[in-house]
Amino acid sequence: MQTALFCVLAVVAVASGAAVFVVDSMARATYALALSFVAVGVSLLLLDLAYLGVVTVLMMVMEMAIMAVFMVMFMMNPAGFMPMSMLHGKRAALAVSGGVFLALAALALLVPWPDRRGAAPADPTRAAGEAIMGSKMLVMIGVSAVLFTTIVAALVLAVARGRYGDDESAEHGHREGRGPHNGHGGGHGSHADHGGPGAHAGHGDHGGRIDHARHGTHAASRPEGSGT
Amino acid sequence: MTLELFLLLASALFAVGTYGALSQQSVVMVMMGLELMVNGVIVAAAAFWYFLAPAAPDGQVLVLVVIAAMTVDMAMGFAVVTLLFRAKDADMTDMAAELKR
């Protein structure tokens, strides 16, 4: 019974994982990935990992929700209305992934795995919690430091250059005879790459609006963007 | 349920993720491929814990660390994508080729 359930879950997980790279619509790809993660989470539940299975499902559903937002922000064709191929090296990728699967499957089937040592605790969640708070506390302290570093690093990388950090746009402001308080242009540092110095004079005041427009015409402006 | 079945599932997920990470041009899709690969690692770690050494909690802690690594990978990946998009209007992997020069 459990084996049958596991087989169904495994097929669902792999099939929806493969569907991620097949469907046209990015929204569907996101849902397919979420379904794959849910199937994996439920198969963790089959291994008595109640806490880890539920954590996986919850985290991945939230992560896919965030990913959907990024999809709409960054992708040319989020809804899949214009079917297009966005692949490179498809044949090589297929060969490599097929080889990876064969190698891993051969390892899984051919290695003489040792026998099971000991029995599962009555409450694996309790065992994990006691390990985290006891013998494995150093691991979690390390993870927490890494997570905090990630927060800071991600913010530093992703945040728009403010009026304290963008030397380039400050220089532009001086050159064009505006005061150093020309903060709007500074908020969107990438304009300098697109328009030349002439076009930049107009951008300064309407930086925010143009930035929105740029998202809308993202696909149309691509050749220009890739040309620079 | 056997260890081999779970490891087969893990290797299939890992291989599908490898295909996505190698073949997709959009950065977001590449990151979906990476997520699938980590997904396979989670399955394998959980299966190793359950079928080989369930008495010790090490396997569960390993799964927790892998989940944390997955979130870190997502966060840093999207931060870099945002930076690339701000700097160069690039959302495809082929458009970010500065290091080739």
Image: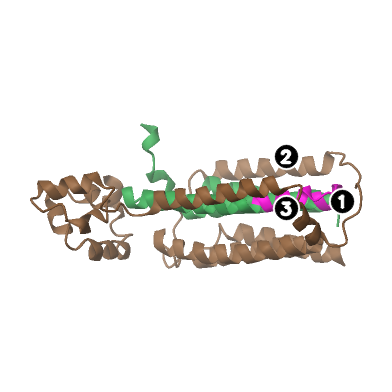
Chain colours: A brown, B green
Q: Nearer the viewer, residue A187 or A29?
A: A187
Front residue of this view, candidates B94 and A61: A61
Q: Alpha-carbon distance for marks 2 and 1?
A: 30 Å
Quadrant containing the C terminus of chain A in the rendered view = top left
Nearer the camera: disc 2 or disc 3: 3
Judging from the image, what secondary structure is the residue with disc 2 in?
A: helix
Ranked by sequence position, the earlier of labels 2 and 3 is 2
Identity, as a three-letter code, of the amino acid under mark 1 = Ala
| Residue found 89% across the figure and 41% down from its top | A114
Q: Left or right of A91: which side holds A119?
A: right
Question: Which residue is nearer to you in this view: A84 or A43?
Answer: A43
**Range of the magenta residues?**
B49-66
What secondary structure predominates along the stretch shown in magenta?
helix
Mark drawn on residue B55:
1
Residues at circles 1 and 3 in contact by the CB criterion of under 8 Å: no
Q: Is residue A227 left or right of residue A36?
A: left
- Residue B43 is left or right of residue A153, and the answer is right
Q: Which residue is mark 2?
A: A103
Local SS, label 3: helix
Asked if marks 1 and 3 fall on the same chain, the answer is no
Q: Quick check: A142 above or below B36?
A: above
> Which residue type does callout 2 highlight?
Ala
Q: Nearer the viewer, mark 2 or mark 1?
A: 1
Q: Gap between marks 1 and 3, in whole Å?
A: 15 Å
Q: Is residue A44 visible?
A: yes
**Quick one: which residue is furthest to the front in this view?**
A134
Q: Which residue is mark 3?
A: A132
Give the percent coordinates (x, y) of residue A52: 72, 60
Q: Are marks 2 and 3 on the same chain?
A: yes
Quarter assignment of residue A22? bottom right
B60 in magenta: yes
The residue shown at (68%, 53%) is B64
